[in-house]
Amino acid sequence: MERLCLCKWNMSSKNWKSAVSELLREFSFKTTTENLLQTALETRELADPTVIHEDIAIPHCRSILVDDFKIIIGKSDKGIPWPKEKVNVIILFITPVKPSGPSEHMELIKHLAKALRSGGAEKVLSAGSPAEAASILKLKYEGNPGND
Amino acid sequence: MIRELEKLISLHDLDIMISDLVNKDIVKQEKKLGLSPDLAASQLRKLRDELSLTIDRTYRDLYDQLAGHYGNAVVPVINQMCSGCFTQLPTAFCASPDRNDRVETCPSCGRFIYWCD
């Protein structure tokens, strides 16, 4: 099944915390939910920054606060310190906590690992549009205002 | 939402993250991506302990008991139903406008419950 994703092109954030916040805002969560997810994602990054490949970060968590997969691809041409190395592409995802356990979360990580291998990461970094980036990651771009 | 309830939700999310990072299959995939799940898990345990100490002891002890018994100690209320035990909650219980401004437990299973805003 093709998973849906949002995109945020031309991100304006200058540090990783505000980048997480900028991306979370795109989902239009209510304030408390957004704040708690921000805390969860920040905690994960503080434990060990999720920079993979050069120039790509994948902040992620599983949370009881979402009932479906939330995936967003962010892009910044100037780069965002994460917290030391600059990244140009951010793939943020939150997966729901289900009684079936973490299998779907694992499947999504596996899916991304596969898509980013064998040149996928370079292609995402040079993608010219949200739809192209989503397609490289084998995700379906939902379309969100101001990103096409 | 009352701060204590927010902390319990964060503690639950942290426990989920830690359990994921010791799951063999997830560790394998994270390593393939170039991440360091072992380091992340040990750091998250430290952060979990720090957060846990800031929670009222009564709630903290209850959280640990519930997590040990059910695996999940905090659950959302969906359609007036506890999503842990699927018991319908009394209407009066759900109708309160300040329902997330106090720490509530499910009258049936005892899990901490919160309402999605």
Image (cartoon, rainbow, N blue to C red):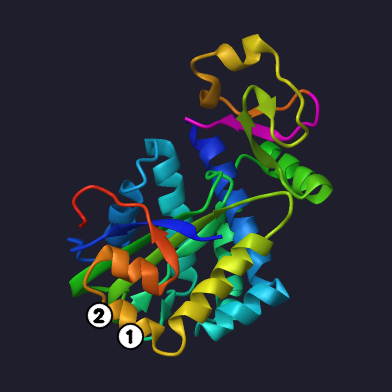
* Residue A55 in view, yes or no: no
Residue farthest toward the top in the current orientation of the protein: B92
Q: Please tell me whether residue A143 is drawn above or below residue A80 in the rendered image.
A: above
What element does badge 1 sit on? helix
- Say which amino acid is labelled 2: Ser
Q: Is residue A35 magenta?
A: no
Residue farthest toward the right in the current orientation of the protein: B69
Q: Please tell me whether residue A54 is drawn above or below residue B14 in the rendered image.
A: below
Residue B76 location, quadrant: top right
Query: Contact (CB < 8 A) between labels 2 and 1?
Result: yes
Give the labeled residue for mark 2: A126
Which residue appears at 56% of the width and 25% of the height? Answer: B102
In the rendered structure, the answer to whether residue B91 lies left or right of residue A83 reads right
On the image, the x and y values in percent for residue B11 come to 59, 50
On the image, the x and y values in percent for residue A116 come to 44, 81
* Residue A100 in view, yes or no: yes
Q: Is residue B113 magenta?
A: yes
Q: Nearer the viewer, residue B103 or B24?
A: B24
Residue A118 location, quadrant: bottom left
On the image, the x and y values in percent for residue B116 come to 52, 32
Mark 2 residue crowding within 10 angstroms, few (<14) / some (14–19) / many (20+)? some
Which residue appears at 77% of the width and 25% of the height? Answer: B87
Q: Please tell me whether residue B79 is drawn above or below residue B26 in the rendered image.
A: above
Q: Please tell me whether residue A62 is drawn above or below residue A51 in the rendered image.
A: above
- Say which amino acid is labelled 1: Glu
In the rendered structure, the answer to whether residue A123 lies left or right of residue B98 reads left
CA separation, marks 2 and 1?
6 Å
Give the labeled residue for mark 1: A122
Total residue callouts: 2
The magenta segment is B108-117
Residue A49 location, quadrant: bottom left
